[in-house]
Amino acid sequence: MRILVGMSGGVDSSVAAALLAEEGHEVVGVTMRLWGGDSDTGCCSVADVDDARRVAQQLGLDHVVFNFSDDFDERVVSPYVEAHSRGITPNPCIECNRHLKFDRLSERARVLGFDAVATGHHARLERDAEGRPRLARGADRDKDQSYVVHMVDAEELERTVFPIGHLSKAEVRDHARRLGLRTADKPDSQDVCFITSTGGRERFLGDRIPLRSAPVVDTEGRQLGEVPSVELVTIGQRRGLGLPGGGPLRYVVDVVAEPEPVVVVGDGADLMRGSVEVDSFSWVDGAVVGEVRAQVSAHGPAQRARCVATDESGVIRIDWEEPQRRVAPGQSVVLYDLEDRWVLGGGVARR
Amino acid sequence: MDGLLYLDHAASTPMRPAAVEAMTPFLTDCFANPSGSHRFARTARRAVDEAREQVAAVLGVLPGEVIFTGCGTESDNQAVTGSVAQRGGLAVTSAVEHHAVLDPVLASGGVAVGVDATGHVDLEELAQVVRSSDAVSVVSVMTVNNEVGTVTDMAAVAEVVRREAPGAWLHTDAVQAACWIDLREVTPLVDMLSLSAHKFGGPKGVGVLVARSGASPAPIIRGGGQERERRSGTSNVAGIVATAVALAETDAERGAEAARVGALRARLVQSISSSVDAHETVPGSACVPGVVHLCFEGIENEALLFLLDTEGVCASAASACASGAMEPSHVLAAMGVPRGIAGGALRLSLGHTSTEEEVDAAARAVVSSVARLRGAG
């Protein structure tokens, strides 16, 4: 096959490209230039592009850079900023996958005559009994990224390759060392690429929108404290709220941006909800309603639970079997089959 | 370059064999530092002196007015930054300059004047800008645009500058002009002029800055005081020797080459635009023979360049940033080309090794790639 491999400059995509080349595919590496501003690896992440290019050179692959920065600004960064201004907690990496990797890039690849796009995500393509493509969790459950690629539907899956999805992270690094790739010991990237570790979300958002202070109140409306910027507060958060210590654990249970910003805190029980509504929903291979499992990866470790999904004219209503912590609006809710193997679809939690 | 169709001469043109031959002894046997005081050094010194005279003769200036630098960008930077450092005042340029001029001008707080749809600087706006400033340090307008090939009427620019700001130094970035324009006709009009050797068959790593009497931009590299205290650093003897040979050869062949390459240019434009819909950004009458700039509406130039690359065609679009990504063209934006059309820009540039067969094969590749991308859309 003729495969275009997205190479970020990290170890996963380096090994993905290497394995495809070893299998004899005709492979071209591409690094997308997405963010033109500051990042932790320099303007336009030049150091990462250098890593990707040097790995491609070492593997004897052509390497190109595509400039999708306009699309990234429009489809990822602007919505990210706008969502925060409304008290919503977006997941820009998922929007980047949706609009850039598995739309803009895959379309470009199709136009240029490639059979498939490959990425270094920890996810797998499996087939069901009828031979239909299924999006499965990566073999390394700690590194599984099926959640962030849930928008890849069956049609797209037929043109997508996840060459390292069957490997553990340790095996990926072993391959990189075996091949002598310079990215073998490069640390995993953890954070949003356009947020620097020095400036953080606060500076990024503060440069773009006014950050407003907000009173922190309990569920009865009594003021307990104040936060400097309501835009940086997320549902479920319990630190950095400026509350005196020693009392009972308090969580943010609601963030109100308009008309006057307010942060509402409560105890663990106040955070629990019986259901969540999800929109912008995309199914991998048609709607699957009824009893399923859902995964939410907002603040902290992934939250997985059984639920019943109901399609209410496009909005998917998730009724939890047991009450769950409230899903912050803007976070993705991804549905899996009951065996927790295959992604069925996913969308974005509504307010 | 077996199997390659090289249509990127404006990025870099192959070295002339005579230049390679001339420089080789100075990379091997005659390696001495020409600033030394022994006989070995004097051999190297003589080669640099002779090269300087050869370059001066082609440019119609005095040898003492020729400064060898490390690249065209350095020459441009010294002309702008060095002038502002030397005498203060405003730096003024056109909006379509190479970044080597534009960036130092803007960094010094200078002004970029607009251009018309063909890329010619707006002379009225230029007059207005320099007239309304108390002190203009330097005006810099390129002789030939690197992206679209537009030739500036330097006499008209000089007339405006001398009339409206008699004290200003006039600099021209002639990096893309050397192959096509007799620079003896340009140097009398200006105070400073920049060249880059690898654009005319010399090596990379050598630039020329002409600073005519009266124009004394401050050095931007200080040290051992080479180049009469105007540009320190050990002379790149081999590169300088090769530069002089390449420039002299280019000059001797210029008339015939301009006619030959001009015919190739016309042939290339004709064979592409008769088969696919294309906008010729600057017509041949306003453009150097070596540059064809086309815009293909509805096409993304990254995709087009990729397909051309797979066909072995070396071409370019706009300039690339440090990551290697294509940047939207500031030249086309200044010319008022809508972004949707500018996104399908392609520069095919010709030079001393271009042939009819090469041009025909490249035209076929462009036509088939454009048709394929339009079909796939």
Image (cartoon, helix red, strand yellow):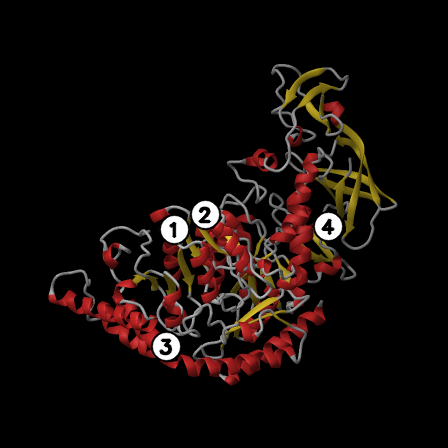
**Residues marked 1 and 2 touching at CB (< 8 Å):** yes
Q: Which residue is mark 3?
A: B251
Residue at (79, 55) in percent of width and height:
A285
In the picture, the quarter occupied by the N terminus of chain B is bottom left
* Among numbered discs 3 and 1, the one appearing first in the sequence: 1
Q: Going by the image, does B233 lie left or right of A273?
A: left
The chain holding disc 2 is B
Q: Measure the C-alpha gap from mark 1 to mark 2.
A: 9 Å
* Among numbered discs 1 and 2, the one appearing first in the sequence: 1
Up/down of B198 relative to A265, above or below: below
Q: Measure the C-alpha gap from mark 4 to mark 3.
A: 70 Å
Q: Position of residue B348 (x, y in %)?
A: 53, 72
Q: Position of residue B22 (x, y in %)?
A: 27, 75
**Residues marked 4 and 3 touching at CB (< 8 Å):** no
Q: Which residue is mark 4?
A: A342
- Image quarter of residue A290: top right
Same subunit, tags 4 and 3: no
Q: Measure the C-alpha gap from mark 3 to mark 2.
A: 35 Å
Residue at (64, 45) in percent of width and height:
A77
Q: Which residue is mark 1?
A: B81
**Residues marked 2 and 4 touching at CB (< 8 Å):** no
Q: Secondary structure at mark 2?
A: helix
* Residue that sits furthest to the front in the current view: B163
Up/down of B240 relative to A284, above or below: below
Q: Secondary structure at mark 3?
A: helix
